Image (cartoon, coloured by chain):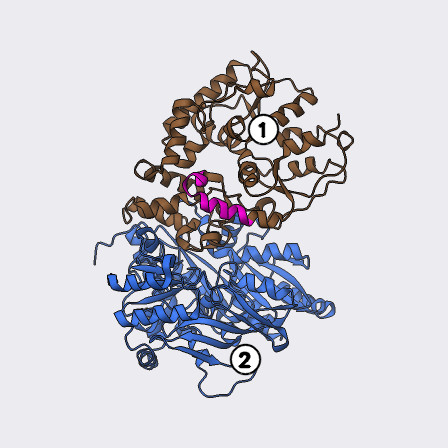
Amino acid sequence: MQCTSCSFCTVTCPVMNVLLTDASSPRGRVQIAYGLYTGELEVDESATQRLYECTTCGMCDHTCPSGVHIVDVIKAARKVVYPEHAVEKQRTFADNITEKEHTYGELKEPIWAFTGHAPKERSEIAYFMGCKITAETGHKQGIAAVNILDRLGVDFTTLNEVCCGAPLMYIGVSEDRIRKQMEKNINEIRKRGVKKVLFSCPSCYYMFEKVYPKYTDVSDIEFQHIVEFLDGKLSPDEFEAGTEPITYHDPCHLGRTFNIYEEPRNLIKLIPDADYAEMEHNRENSLCCGAGGSLALYEPSLTKKMADRRVAEAGERTVVSACPNCVGNFSKHTNAMSIEELLWTKLKG
Amino acid sequence: MIPSEMLEELKALLGDRVSSAPADTYVFGFDASIHHHKADAVVFPESTEEVAEIVKLCNKYRVPVTPRGSGSALAGQAVPIKAGISMSFKRMNRIKEVRVEDLQVIVEPGVINDDLNRELAKYGFFYPPSPGSGKVATIGGMVAMNASGMRALKYGATRDYVMALEVVMPTGEIAHFGTHTIKDASSYQMAKLMVGSEGTLGIITEITLRISPLPKDTSIVLAAFEDARMAGQTISDIIAYPMIPASVEFMDRVCLQSVINSRGVDFPLVDAVVMIELEGTEEEMAEDLKKVEEIARKNGAVDIRVSSDPEKMKEWLEARKAVLPSMSQYARGKMFMVSLADDMSLPISKIPDAVYGFHEIEKRHPHVVLGVYGHAGDGNLHTIFLIDPRKEEAWKDAEKMVEEMYELVIDFGGTVSGEHGIGITKAPFMRIEKKDSMELMKRIKRALDPNDIMNPGKNVEWDDGILVDLRYPVEFGGD
């Protein structure tokens, strides 16, 4: 009822702008959730489809003048449709996480094997890598992050981490299963005396900073995205000059949830004579890459269409981002790299 | 339910651009009004020819068809109240031709107002009608409602800008009304008849609009008052001076609080604010600004703010445009905005008395909080009701209040809608206001739409009350 049905969210939604139907707009999803709640709609394929056709990018929350937490409504409604109507790939991910602790199944290589950093018994700072980096994208982002921290002389530890639980939340799996992931991670962090955790993945950061505190008191631990940590710790004279033509893609959570827009740009601009230009939609108006919110599991063809729109904005420029999910998605369609890789390859020596 | 043969024929025509999926037909049963009714199927045509074929099928099978832009109508115009087909124009959204030398632009109905203005700005032109919902309002919807918005005082409403229309008539033939010339005295002004017809007389598939050069410079004055009647008096005094600003907007305390809560804008929280938008050369504006300030001070303004900074003016204008959807932020979680008596137009001189009168009526209705805002400079007010829509007594109280307010409007020589249209929610009061022309209008409807398929049951055809097919979780126990 908080929703006045004004439709302001419909024109900014990147999914709606591809599918061009009100049924797949934020307002439409809120209305479907309402219909499921009142019983006017049954849980069926059509309701499921519209609820999962969303990347939870948060553009609607950012737009809504009525202050409706639209993404929260969608996530709650997904819990209703998940048991009967999840697709196989969603179930596989959920089972992987709860049975093998990681989104993509058991790790083929432990973190220490490709980073050279085994978990330390005690350390005040930890680096949480996230499933996308530990398992799928060739570890490059994680290696670069670890190398930069080493170069700065940061005393940190890696962790025997498990999936943060974000995919479970996006798919609509029950909160109990998310809590189990949280308990394992928080126990691991506390066991090593960690006071601050750094993240490369904005979704992991979101879970620790915004979701875990709903379940338990984690106020004794500070959580921070790595671009925020690195901002101000490097100087231009440490970098080789020049880059290929690049642009920066704002990850949804890092931007619209945490307002971290300038820190990654500050880091990129440390590179003397960087060939940098913004895309048309940037900062709070940035368009989702299409891979968020488990959409890539449910409807990969829609993910591709959304990525295509963003790639068209980037043109010939390499897309740099601070999210392994975005980088992984863009890499299927254009040149893309993480901000950690960009910085590490341009650092002298 | 629509016949299965018809659905098959629609699929043959449109492929996957037709849906009868329950979630889809449910969503297309909403607009921004208080009403909801599921469609039987949703279609997404991409051309005038497809629209004509769909309408022919509707006519053949006697199935209602309700056209839909962005679904932001406030009185139920896009709700398929008799079920049937909901026709979305999201896929007919091209700006077909910009002809600045002929002062016109040709568009498809799904083009969004602000997108059109972004394109026209490249040529130094704009389309002046400026609804608060300009970010989402489609040109087709604006024509169907005769929408206007903030600049009507100086520039007029949509009707003043429609030069020509392509319309699919209720029997499926394609008709062209109006001309591509500035002047037109050729027979009946059918294009003007279609403007404001709310999809009940035909479906608009192409629109030729007159355009205007962008103004040179603009400034905005915000004048704050602790007495809303004096704010209204200020508006009348400015017009009578004489001065015709680009817009003169009014917001009362409830609206100001809502938009401050929603957007954090730096509006003063007072009984009422008048926002005056001036255009012209630097010299012209300096003179007008001086006079506006003088009039506002004479009427007891407690705070006057002036800006020519584009960023600040954009912030103020966008905040003003966000008043309506921000209203649920006033008493969050307890009272919610519902669209009742959302729009009325009055002789400009009656604004102070109308604002006072509405709030006096509000005092007699304990279940309603009333917000008043609008384009007061042209006599067009919007009133927003905040109620708990889960409670029957709140609706009954609100219904009575709507009746009293519209009685006042009609007594003042006003009309029940200035720009949001009639649809369902205002139809009972239009019957009172236009009692001697209702039958004539019904005859026009019957002549053009003999099988009553075109957005049926709305406007001149609605013969029920307003608390019908509500989209809220409330049950009425009966009288």
Quarter of the image for residue A247 reads top right
Point 68% across, 57% down: residue: B309
B442 relative to B304, above or below:
below
Point 37% across, 50% down: residue: A31
- The magenta stretch is A294-309
Residue B472 position within the rendered picture, expressed as x and y whole percent measured from the top left: 32, 52
B59 relative to A246, above or below:
below
Residue neighbourhood size for the residue with mark 1, other residues' Cα within 10 Å, grouped as few (<14), some (14–19), many (≥20): some
Quarter of the image for residue A73 reads top left
Q: Look at the numbered disc 1 and give the secondary structure of its residue.
A: strand
> Which residue lies under the disc numbered 2?
B180
Q: Disc 1 marks which amino acid?
A: Gln
Q: Chain of mark 1?
A: A
Residue A217 shows up from this direction: yes
Point 50% across, 28% down: residue: A131
Residue A227 position within the rendered picture, expressed as x and y whole percent measured from the top left: 63, 32
> Which residue lies under the disc numbered 1?
A224
Residue neighbourhood size for the residue with mark 2, other residues' Cα within 10 Å, grouped as few (<14), some (14–19), many (≥20): some
